[in-house]
Amino acid sequence: MLFNSIDFALFLPWVFAKYWIIPKKWVKSQNLLLLIASYVFYGWWKPEFLILIAASSLIDFLVGLGLEKYEDKGLRKLLLGVSISANLGMLAYFKYANFFIENFVSAFTFFGSPLQVESLRIILPVGISFYTFQTLSYSIDVYRGKLKATKDPIAFFTFVSFFPQLVAGPIERAVDLLPQIEKERTFDYDNAVTGLKQILWGLFKKIAIADLCAHIVYAVFLKHEEASGSALLFAAVMFSFQIYGDFSGYSDIAIGTARLFGIKLSPNFRFPYFSRSIPEFWRRWHISLTTWFRDYVYIPLGGSRGSTFRTVFNVVLVFVVSGFWHGARWNFIWWGVLNALWFLPSLLLKLNRKNLDVVGEGKVLPSVLDVLKIGGTFLIVTMFWIFFRADNMDVAFSIVRKILSPDLFSDFTKFPMRDFRFLLYTIPLFMAVEWFGRESTFALEKLGENWPRILRWSFYIAIAVVIFFKLGKPQGFIYFQF
């Protein structure tokens, strides 16, 4: 079920009304409703994949109970191994089986021994990368003693499948989300209003920014051989806005929806395109995944506490694994490598912890130096996004070569671009709203709270009108494929 569909527009109010009719003391009944709603939400696409999420939940629930019960180190390691093997095994089969088969065949062909092996016909379950990491972190935290195992199966299954963030995050930790699910929740009007504003802004990002940018990106990348360097650069910039509007829009809708049910989810984006360096960008982009890899991969490997070689190895490995997490294609891996290579100098020179503040905090406009830093970082990120978006490495390098050639100075408007004029005005206005709301958790949280009521409501209505008139056939979210 898509957030930007009529189905969800009918589904959400129904679940919301039923949920708050239940007395707050009946926490298990509320959780059962959320669990059923979450399974309906997920099963709307392919009901058979409910078996996977249920199996993953059951395994980790039982593993948690075992870790809580037994003190023997060997047995505890075995139980953790069961959790890791089961979760990563399912993820590897559904997401990476064909990748390894194809590369195995290619390797033999390269050495003159071609194999006749067909790829498996595997459909990737939506959201499997997200809920796998979420439930896996529960087992690891219980094993480490950071969390007590829950004995409430309904609460645990609800934690794993909570529908607002089930399909594309944020990836929640059990230490943050599970206690909220287990305790009583009281309806808070102000919190619900904030949630509705966040949903509104998320829908605007998705429908009025991401989906319209997607038309241009698709058209230009599809005919990249015919497109000029200037058209390709423009399409790459549009993809930067597409993927941000699409993914952060999803996160905003998810977080806002959770607020309606009295549950607080972790922020997943903190205005990443106002970053002044690549390290700052990665502190602000897909935060739940970045911190997951930091806590469960980078730090256990030794982080930056060992030798320089070990630090470099750990950083590169984390970025490569992060790229591979996005999909079974070499261009995702190289996208990770490029980010690692640009990240390393700051880390080795101990500059990676700079820019921890909000850019231009308390100021109306950024300084000239901040503008240059933001512009430079955005350009680097945009060039890296080309490798993320391209169908393969050959296409990515071909596009980059054109952009870096004299063809860059040709007239890009010769290439037909749908919604070009609308986006030409909308994106600057969108970024202006983001700029003035950058000191909050999302752009509309406090923006306009001191305006006259008629002006504030006119602003919200204008956003809703734009969404309504630009809403066509519901488009899926980019990160559904991951």
Image (cartoon, rainbow, N blue to C red):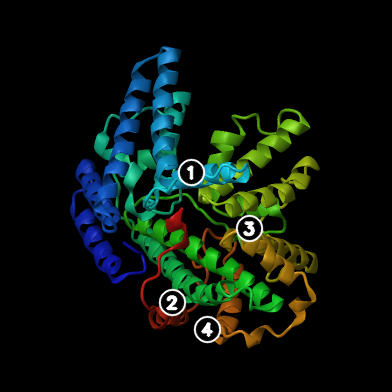
Q: Residue at x 56, y 83 (%)?
A: 417
Circle 3 or circle 1, nearest the eye: 1
- Which mark is first along the chain, 2 or 1? 1
Find residue 460 and name its label. Answer: 2
- Which mark is first along the chain, 2 or 3? 3
Circle 4 or circle 2, nearest the eye: 4
Q: Marks 4 and 3, how far apart in space? A: 27 Å
- Which mark is first along the chain, 1 or 4? 1
Q: Residue at x 41, y 50 (%)?
A: 264
Q: According to the image, label 1 marks what residue?
A: 101
Q: According to the image, label 3 marks what residue?
A: 393
Answer few, some or many: residues within 10 Å of disc 3's Cα (few below 14, many 20 plus, some between 14 and 19).
some
Q: Position of residue 175 (x, y in %)?
A: 43, 36
Disc 2 marks a residue whose amino acid type is: Tyr
439 or 119: nearer the viewer: 119
Answer few, some or many: residues within 10 Å of disc 1's Cα (few below 14, many 20 plus, some between 14 and 19).
some
Helix, strand or loop under label 2: helix
Q: According to the image, label 4 marks what residue?
A: 418
Establish if 232 lies above or below 51.
below
Circle 3 or circle 2, nearest the eye: 3
Disc 4 marks a residue whose amino acid type is: Arg
